Amino acid sequence: MSHKEEALKEKELGNAAYKKKDFEEALARYRKAYKLDPTDMRFLLNQAAAMFEKGDYQTAAKFARDAAKVGEENDPDNKKLIAKAYVRSARSYENFKHFSFARRYYQESLKYEYSKEIEDMLPKLEETAKKVDVELDRRHIGMADLEREYGNFRYKQRKYDKALESYEASIRRNADKPHAFSDRAECYQAIGEHDLALKDCDTSIHLDSTHMKGHLGKAISLRAKGDYENALESFRRAIQLDENSVGPRTRPWGPLPTLREILSTEAGLIRDFLVETGQVTRDDMLKKKKKKKKHRPEDATESVFSEDESEHMKDPEVAHKIQRLVQSGILLFR
């Protein structure tokens, strides 16, 4: 029996338990089915239904939303079922009395399947949201901040899986602020998931273009992926924002690196670039670095190239890249 067949069998057993209102048994069966076949959105949608019946509307909304995403990725032509998932998420949020999210996911469902009933109810739902959501959002933002702080605490303990759970909880409660996204990006970076980190950094920057940690995190992940040019552009923006900031040079995640520290770190990028383009060997660079530290250790982070290394500026491509760094303030010459 294949995994898909086993998954469908577990789903049927879950459905039988669901009809008997044995929701714990049903959930256990649906979870097992999803583990066997994570490409089938129905297993998450079933979990959402069971959670809804248990009165856990917040979790039900999450399962339904996740089901829609699985459907979009694995079965995009099944528009009716994807729409159903978004409707289930919206109704869960509505029961949870979080009308802004309810309205958002009803609107998402209309992209996949038109419903006059839903379209007609949206204006009334929006009016309700205006009256109720202000106080609810205030409460959820407070809980979001607590979840984010707990995530930071777990991150410092290197409990990355648990930290990610806390950041996800924070984002569920308040997806309109950049901080939990950039914190989660840092956690993704710690486990080497740079594509996910970039996605969160881009979201944080979209929410607030002046969010320094979003730009810094983006630079770090781009550098890890070998995209040096765009990494340096993001570092430049982060440095700009840092230089324009006021107050102590600390953030919730720790002391903010100084410009000198960032320059020291990014010097390695230029050395890597020169090695990769065949301008110098890595051994040459290491020897020059050791020689420089020996004779003038106080200057080790202020200048990336020695005088003879500036000969590489004669190569037009190298010169263009380096000139960009000088103009951005990331690279200094004596």
Image (spheres, rainbow, N blue to C red):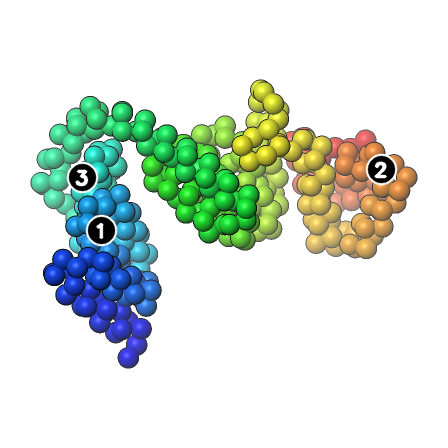
Q: Looking at the image, is mark 3 or mark 2 earlier in the sequence?
A: 3
Q: CA distance from mark 1 to mark 3?
A: 12 Å
Three-letter code, disc 3: Asn
Can you give x and y, in whole percent of width and height, for residue 45 in the image?
23, 55
Left or right: where 33 falls relative to 114: right
Image quarter of the C terminus: top right
Q: Look at the image and tell me whether residue 108 can be seen.
A: no
Q: SS class of the residue under badge 2?
A: helix
Q: Label 1 belongs to which residue?
A: 51
Left or right: where 281 falls relative to 94: right
Q: Is residue 190 above or below residue 40?
A: above
Q: Label 2 belongs to which residue?
A: 297
Q: Is residue 33 above or below residue 226?
A: below
Can you give x and y, in whole percent of width and height, for residue 231 in the image?
59, 42
Q: Label 3 belongs to which residue?
A: 95
Name the residue at 41% across, 47% down.
Answer: 165
Of circles 3 and 2, which is in front? 3
